[in-house]
Structures are given as C-alpha cells and as structure tokens.
Image (cartoon, rainbow, N blue to C red):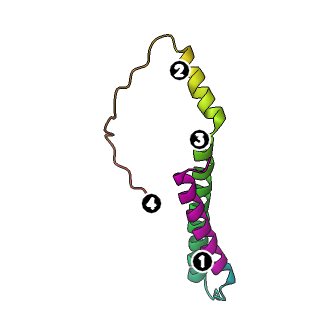
Amino acid sequence: MSSQPDGQYTRRIADIQEELTQLQASTRIVANAEEMASLEREIRVLTDRLAAALLGQKVQASLDSEEMTEAERKLIEEYPKRMKSEGKKRSRRSYNVRK
C-alpha cells in the first residue's frame, strides 16, 4: 500500500541522503579542533535526521500493514463491550516538530 505519508518519508530520506552524499564528496579540510567539532556536529545532525525519517517510515508501514489492521479488528471484536469514541482531546503540552 503506497500512502501519502510514505511518499513524504521517501522524499525526506532521499533529501537527507543527498545532503550526506554532498558532504562526503566535499573537499572540506579540517585544520583545527573547532572545525573538527563543527564537522562532527553536522554529520551527527544529518545522520540523526536520517535515522528519524527511516524509523518514521518503518513505524508508518507497520501501522498500515495488514497484520496491524487484523490485530485492530480482532481487538475490537474481542472487547467485552461496545467501544465508543470520546472524540479528540487537546494536549496540555505543546511540541515543536522539526521538518
């Protein structure tokens, strides 16, 4: 099943991989400790973003899978009484989501 979120993850992953490829191909020279620390931070930020995007893609695929749909259906069927939606609730916390 190809869903819109999967396409977003695929584009995000490709963009990050391109940034990593450009960084790898760059001829940047590290001449002192500050430059080394800066390069290390830049690499860590990119690889952390890549890891987050890959994990998000895998979790979304798991949630969209037939196995998960079947597990949800089974849980609903086996629940002892009728389930009722309580509607959307506001979170008391606010989160900053990085893109």
- Which residue type carries mark 2? Ile
Residue 32 image offset from top left, x and y in percent:
61, 86
Vertical arrangement, residue 60 with respect to residue 80, above or below: below
Q: Earlier in the sequence, mark 4 or mark 1?
A: 1
Mark 2 Cα-neighbour bin, 10 Å: few <14, some 14–19, many ≥20: few
In the displayed structure, 62 sits above or below 11; it is above
Q: CA distance from mark 3 to mark 1?
A: 38 Å
Residue located 43% across and 19% down the image: 83
Label 4 Cα crowd, 10 Å radius (few <14 / some 14-19 / many 20+):
few
Residue 74 at x, y percent in the picture: 60, 21
Q: Amino acid at mark 1?
A: Leu
Q: Which residue is mark 4?
A: 98
Decide which of 18, 41 is in the foreground and name it: 18
Closer to the N terminus: mark 2 or mark 1?
1
Distance between mark 2 and mark 4 Cα atoms: 34 Å
Residue on which disc 2 sits: 76
Q: Earlier in the sequence, mark 2 or mark 4?
A: 2
Q: Which residues are magenta?
A: 1-22
Query: Which SS class for mark 2?
Result: helix
Instruction: Kindly state the secondary structure of the residue where label 4 is placed.
Output: loop
Q: Amino acid at mark 3?
A: Asp
Q: Earlier in the sequence, mark 3 or mark 1?
A: 1
Task: Please identify, in this view, whether the residue under mark 2 or under mark 4 is nearer the observer.
Answer: 2
**CA gap, disc 2 to disc 1?**
51 Å
Looking at the rendered structure, the secondary structure element under dot 1 is helix
CA gap, disc 3 to disc 2?
Answer: 17 Å
Q: Amino acid type of disc 4?
A: Arg
Of the image marks 3 and 2, the number of the one nearer the N terminus: 3
The residue mark sitting in front, 4 or 3, is 3
Q: Which residue is mark 1?
A: 39
| Residue under numbered circle 3 | 64
